[in-house]
Image (tube, helix red, strand yellow):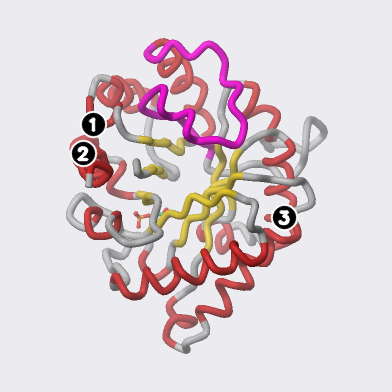
Amino acid sequence: MQKLIVANWKMNGSLEKINLDIGQYTDNPHVNSSYVILALPYVYLLQAQFMLRNRYKIANESEKYNYFVHKDHGFKVAAQDISCYLGYGAYTGEISGNMLKDIGVSYAIIGHSERRSLFNEADAMLLNKLENALASNIIPIFCIGENFTLRKDQRYRLFILQQLELLCKVEVGFNALVIAYEPIWSIGTGVIPSEAEISEIVQLIRTFMQNKLPRVKITLLYGGSVTASNIQSILLLDGIDGVLVGGASLDVDKFKQICLYAVECAKN
Ligand code: PGA
């Protein structure tokens, strides 16, 4: 099965880089035959959308809750966040799901550990963000993962289950969701969990979702220090549908290599 690659640029990039990189990706056969989602800073989303529309001749992004629409073209864009407020209103500085949808963006990262820790995003706010996304037909890329202390103290399983519980509180019905397991101790550190450690969590998440939300289609990603050198073994793990790549997605050549591996892996 084809794997999904989400590239999280975080607070990086420039208009020039967007133009150069997307120009290269849309001409690259491996990127074109992968499912890639570029999560860009808000200010660059519209430009990226224009480029993709021209390249892929997307008439109108009307798809709902189904990333397999990807089959039509190589890649899409995502927001790195979304407002916890729905619609429009007096919320200075916020970007709502309606606005993202207005420019054809269909995905938003929600609950990335950097937002949880640096911006104090706790469950109540994340629940609103999930509901805002779903009410606006935006597919959430929901990030979860434990820190090093929880891992060391063997409390990580319970912690991950608690993070997943939030999904059961979402009132708007949803039928597709991307979940990214990103252990905080692996993000940006170059330290990768062992295959057994990743597989343990994959199974934990899959079992939880199967029991609690059996009708929701889950695309399960691993994130944290993914590079062109370790992606192959990660993608081959049972139950893994793709990866979320931070740092390594900023380098065009490395990212093209990552896409090449994803395409090769899908052939196996
Ligand atoms: P990294 O970041 O690949 O640089 O570790 C992953 C992420 O934070 O999403």
Secondary structure of the residue carrying numbered label 1: helix
| Residue annotated with mark 2 | 260
Is 61 magenta? The answer is yes
Which residue is at 56% across, 53% downward?
142
Question: In front here: 18 or 50?
Answer: 50
Which residue is at 31% across, 61% downward?
237
Which residue is at 36% across, 66% downward?
186
Q: CA distance from mark 1 to mark 3?
A: 36 Å
For this orientation, the residue located farthest to the right is: 89
- Asked where in the image residue 152 lies, by quadrant, the reply is bottom left
Dot 1 or dot 3: first in sequence order is 1
Residue 83 location in percent, x, y? Answer: 69, 42
Is 30 magenta? The answer is no
| Residue annotated with mark 1 | 30
User: Do the residues under discs 1 and 2 have CB atoms within 8 angstroms?
Assistant: yes
Question: In front here: 170 or 50?
Answer: 170
Residue type beneath disc 3:
Leu
Left or right of 75 on screen, residue 112: right
What stretch of residues is rendered in magenta?
55-79
| Residue annotated with mark 3 | 127
Secondary structure of the residue carrying numbered label 3: helix
Query: How busy is the neighbourhood of tag 2: few (under 14 within 10 Å), some, or many (20 plus)?
Result: some
Q: CA distance from mark 2 to mark 3?
A: 36 Å
